[in-house]
Amino acid sequence: MKFIKDFFKLEAASGIIIVFAAISALIIANSPYWISYGLFLDFPVEFRAGTLFIEKPLFLWINDGLMTVFFFLVGLELKREVMEGELSVSTNLVLPVLGAIGGIIVPVLIYIGINWSDEIAIRGWAIPAATDMALVLGVLSLLGNRVSTQLKIFLVSITLIDDIAAAIIIVLFYTEALSSNYFFIALSLMPVLYILNRLNVVNIIPYFLVGIVLWVVVLKSGIHEALAGLILALFIPLKSKRNSRRSPLKELEHDLHPIVAFGVLPLFAFANAGVSLQGIDLEFILHPVSLGIAAGLFVGKQLGVFSFCWVALKSGFVSLPSGINLIHLYGVSLLCGLGFSRGFFISSLAFRDTDMILPFDERLGIIMGTVLSGICGYLVLYWSTKNRRDQTKKVIHQ
């Protein structure tokens, strides 16, 4: 239980810092220092080892490199949850999976419906499908002990599954031209990781070395590097056979959490949230891309998550976790519309290869949908958990 409490505290604080980083980027991007902000993101960073040469602007190192670390952490969390956590019980897995599926399908359909006729805009169809776990838990932290641990775990389960789905979407639909040679090299590294796992190698260094090679060949293959992080996480041993008290996976997860929560995600938000508001008018805000993303996040997420869960509950083969009612479920569905850093990530891939100056800024839609979802989700949960807060006070006074 202490591990779960520490996790929530860390993620909640991270959500608040992410918001601060995003607001800072917005202010700088609309100040006299906007040129320095652009130069910072465009700063060239290169890596060379023999004939291997990788050069990217700092913006892409943040989006492609550091976010691989994030997806590696997501993979570790998911493996732990599936093997011994809440998701290890099949009945606990069904409802979050259905909610996550609904929270992906409905927002995507809304976006596609609004942007169907624009071949450039349609590239962003997956943007409103993403949910930002750190930001969600940041909002929950504002509610204090009004929100039960069961509700937090349920919401984390949905966002974890959503993150995995986002990684799969990225690999399947936002992969550049595939290089078969590098792809097969990447496949050949998986048996190496499997052997390390079967031999119960608990030293992280061999996995780390293979992981670096895997990241490079996945990058060169044209598949997004996020896949390398997920694959590597699946082979990290959960327990040591020699020392049952030791868990390499949990140790690594514990070490990475503060790095990702207070380094990777805030830096990612700072690099992506710098939207220039100069020349922004109502027509720009209501562009089909911005509107499709905002509607997908605010309307599609709540409709998809809640309706899929509601149908499953009415069918009778699943039930809500203890201490959670339908109003709580609706509040959770609203918070799933917080698509901040993950939305920025997918949008950077969706429109990266577009050479023309686009008549829209998809980040506006992400910000609008996220703000609306956050405010409404907070208000619903604040109102629906009032009795729990009062009961907690009575217990303390007694």
Image (spheres, helix red, strand yellow):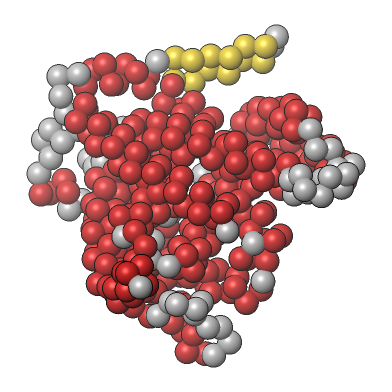
Q: Is residue 283 left or right of residue 356?
A: left
Tell me the quarter of the image containing the N terminus: bottom right
> Which residue occupies the extreme top position in the image?
50
Query: In the displayed structure, does residue 295 sit left or right of residue 311?
Result: left
Number of marks: 0
Query: Where in the figure is residue 376, as x and y percent of width and height?
Result: 24, 64
Q: Nearer the viewer, residue 377 or 354?
A: 377
Percent x, y of residue 149? 47, 65
Q: Residue at x 29, y 73 (%)?
A: 390
Give the quadrant of residue 341: top left
Which image quarter is the C terminus in?
A: bottom left
Q: Is residue 160 left or right of residue 347?
A: right
Q: Single out the residue that lies furthest toward the front.
A: 398
Quadrant of residue 161 within the rendered picture: bottom right
Q: Which residue is drawn at 46% across and 33% down?
A: 264
State which quadrant residue 196 falls in: top right
The residue sitting at 40% across, 31% down in the picture is 267
Give residue 257's position: percent from left, percent from top. Answer: 54, 40
Whether residue 167 is situated above or below residue 268 in the rendered picture: below
Q: Does residue 63 appear in this view?
A: no
Residue 30 point in image, percent of width and height: 16, 28
- Nearest the viewer among 164 and 361 is 164
159 over 181 or under it: above or below: below
Q: Residue at x 36, y 67 (%)?
A: 396
| Towards the viewer: 174 or 23 | 23
Q: Can residue 387 be seen in this view?
A: yes
